Image: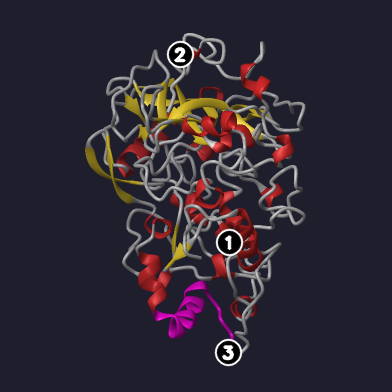
C-alpha cells in the first residue's frame, strides 16, 4: 500500500478490507513442492529456487542482522538487539542459543554465525499459515523435530498476527513479559483490547500498519533502534485534525495520539514491571501474586507484574538515548538503559505513553560498567549462571564474549527502561476525556513534564502553535 499522509477515513476502511486478515493468512498454492524436506536450510533452498531475490532482501534487514548503523549521542555506532543491554535477561551475547530462537535464521549459536550466509534464512517462521511451525526454545533458531516441514512449505502465505507474534508477543521469555502492549491477546483481540486488530473492529494484520517493501518492515523498537527512523504514525492514515473540535485538535501539537487513545496497556495478560537479579541463587519460596504470576525464581531473582496499567508519560521527539556496552555508570544512581529524548520547549516533541521497567543487575565494581553475564548454557555448562549459580564464572564468560574486561569484582545496580506504547488502541468511546488529565486527580505529572502547573489552569505555561 502506498503510504498516504492525509488519507480520508473512508479510504482507510476500504484499504483495510484488502490488507487485513483475521487470523493466519490464507495459504498460496505451493502444492507442487516435492518432499521430503528434512531441515530448515533445506526448506530455504526450496524457497529460493523461485524467490532468489528474497535472500538478498532479507539479508539487509534488521530482522536478520539484529543491528543497524545509528548515530547515538553524536557517535556513529552499529547497534541492535545483538549488542544492546536490557534489564530482563541482560544481553544476547553470550546467550545466543536461547535468544536466537527468535531470530529469522538457523544456527546462530555464537559470534561465529555468518550473517552473509543467507542460505540460513528461515522463510517459514514468517510465512507459515498452518499454525504448526515452531522453533526449539533453546535451539539457536532450529525448527522442532516434530514439525512437518514439507507440509508447512506447501502451505506458506503472507505473514499474520500469529507469525509476527510468535516472537514479538513472547520477548523476554514469556507472554507479555517485555512490551506490555504486545501479547497473545492480540491473536484474536476484543474490540476493547485493540480496536484496530479486533474482528469486530478493523481486523488489521500487523502488516496493515507495518508496511513492507522488499522485506523491509516499517517500524523499529525504540530500545534497540533509538536513532529515530522508520516511524509509524497514526496521522499517516487519520490525518492531524480529525476530531472536529478545535480544542481537541490543538492538542495534537503537543500530545501524541497514543496518549489519549491507549489509556491502559497489559489489558488482558500481566506484564513484568520489575526484575531484581541480586536475589537470584537463593532458596527462597516463591509466591504467586494476585495475577497468578511468580514473584521469585531461583534462576532469575525477584519480579513484579502489572495488569491494565496506566502508562508513564514523557516528551519524545522521535529519537532516544541508550546505554551502550562499556559506558560508565554511577551505581548509586538509576541508570537509564533506554529513554526518550525531548522536552516541553522542543517543538518536535510530544507527550507519549510508556511502559517503564525497572531492574537491578550485575555490574563491574572496579570498571563501573554493566556486565553481560552468561546465564544460559547447555546441560553441564560450568560457565552458565543457570547451571552453577556462580556469578563470577558467568561474568567472566559473558564479558569475554563481548570483548570487555572483567575485574573480578561485581555488584548490583539499579536500572530503568522506557518501552513506547503503540498497540492496544481503545475504541474512541474509551479514549481519555479532559478530566483524566486536567482534573483534580489527573494522571499527568505536570512538573515532571516541565510545567509549573496544569496548563489548562495556567495558560501561560502551555506550549501553543
Q: Is 445 or 120 nearer to us in this picture?
A: 445
Disc 3: which residue? 34
Mark 1 vs mark 2, foreground winner is: 2
Residue appearing at x 51%, y 42% in the figure: 240
Disc 1: which residue? 135
State whether residue 270 is above or below residue 25: above
Q: Is residue 47 visible?
A: yes
> Residue pushed farthest left?
75
Task: Say which element carries label 3.
Answer: loop
All told, the count of numbered labels is: 3
Magenta stretch: includes residue 113? no
| Most common SS among magenta residues | helix
The reply, left or right, for residue 421 in relation to residue 322 is right
Residue appearing at x 57%, y 55% in the figure: 8
Mark 3 vs mark 2, foreground winner is: 2
Q: Which mark is residue 461?
A: 2
The reply, left or right, for residue 397 in relation to residue 173 is left
Label 3, label 2: how far apart the Cα atoms are = 69 Å
Neighbour tally class for label 2: few under 14, some 14-19, many 20 plus, Cα within 10 Å: some
- Placement of the C terminus among the 4 image quadrants: top left
Start and end of the magenta stretch? 34-52
Label 1, label 2: how far apart the Cα atoms are = 54 Å
Amino acid at each position: 500500500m502506498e503510504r498516504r499522509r492525509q488519507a480520508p477515513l473512508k479510504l482507510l476502511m476500504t484499504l483495510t478490507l484488502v490488507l487485513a486478515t483475521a487470523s493466519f493468512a490464507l495459504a498460496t498454492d505451493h502444492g507442487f513442492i516435492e518432499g521430503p524436506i528434512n531441515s530448515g536450510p533445506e526448506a530455504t533452498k526450496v524457497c529460493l529456487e523461485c524467490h532468489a531475490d528474497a535472500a538478498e532482501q532479507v539479508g539487509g534487514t534488521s530482522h536478520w542482522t539484529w543491528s543497524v548503523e545509528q548515530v547515538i549521542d553524536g557517535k556513529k555506532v552499529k547497534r541492535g538487539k545483538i549488542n544492546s543491554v536490557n534489564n530482563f535477561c541482560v544481553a544476547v551475547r553470550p546467550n545466543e542459543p536461547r535468544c536466537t530462537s527468535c531470530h529469522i535464521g538457523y544456527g546462530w549459536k555464537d559470534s561465529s554465525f555468518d550473517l552473509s550466509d543467507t542460505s540460513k534464512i528461515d522463510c517459514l517462521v514468517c510465512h507459515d499459515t498452518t499454525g504448526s511451525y515452531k522453533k526449539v526454545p533453546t535451539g539457536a533458531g532450529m525448527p522442532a523435530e516434530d514439525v512437518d516441514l514439507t507440509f508447512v512449505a506447501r502451505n506458506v502465505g503472507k505473514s499474520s498476527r500469529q507469525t509476527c507474534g510468535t516472537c514479538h508477543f513472547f520477548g523476554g521469555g514469556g507472554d507479555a513479559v517485555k512490551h506490555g502492549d504486545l501479547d497473545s491477546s492480540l491473536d484474536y483481540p476484543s474490540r476493547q483490547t485493540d480496536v484496530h486488530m479486533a474482528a469486530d473492529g478493523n481486523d488489521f494484520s500487523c502488516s496493515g500498519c507495518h508496511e513492507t517493501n522488499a522485506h523491509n518492515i516499517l517500524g523499529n523498537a525504540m530500545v534497540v533502534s533509538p536513532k529515530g527512523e522508520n516511524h509509524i504514525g497514526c496521522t499517516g492514515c487519520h490525518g492531524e485534525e480529525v476530531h472536529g473540535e478545535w480544542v481537541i485538535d490543538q492538542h495534537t501539537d503537543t500530545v501524541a495520539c497514543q496518549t489519549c487513545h491507549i489509556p491502559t496497556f497489559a489489558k488482558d495478560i500481566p506484564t513484568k514491571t520489575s526484575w531484581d537479579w541480586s536475589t537470584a541463587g537463593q532458596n527462597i519460596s516463591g509466591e504467586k501474586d494476585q495475577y497468578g504470576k511468580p514473584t521469585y525464581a531461583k534462576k532469575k531473582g525477584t519480579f513484579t507484574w502489572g495488569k491494565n496499567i496506566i502508562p508513564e508519560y514523557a516528551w519524545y521527539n522521535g529519537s532516544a538515548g541508550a546505554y551502550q556496552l562499556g559506558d560508565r555508570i554511577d551505581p548509586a544512581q538509576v541508570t537509564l538503559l533506554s529513554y526518550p529524548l525531548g522536552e516541553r520547549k522542543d517543538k518536535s516533541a510530544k507527550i507519549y505513553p510508556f511502559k517503564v521497567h525497572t531492574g537491578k543487575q550485575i555490574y563491574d565494581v572496579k570498571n563501573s560498567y554493566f556486565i553481560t553475564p552468561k546465564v544460559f548454557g547447555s546441560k553441564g555448562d560450568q560457565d552458565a549462571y543457570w547451571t552453577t549459580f556462580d556469578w563470577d564464572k558467568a561474568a567472566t564468560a559473558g564479558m569475554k564474549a563481548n570483548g570487555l574486561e572483567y575485574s573480578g569484582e561485581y555488584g548490583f545496580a539499579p536500572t530503568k527502561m522506557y518501552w513506547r506504547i503503540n498497540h492496544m488502541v481503545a475504541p474512541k468511546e474509551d479514549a481519555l476525556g479532559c478530566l483524566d488529565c486536567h482534573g483534580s486527580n489527573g494522571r499527568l505529572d505536570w512538573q515532571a513534564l516541565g510545567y509549573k502547573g496544569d496548563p489548562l489552569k495556567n495558560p501561560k505555561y502551555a506550549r501553543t502553535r
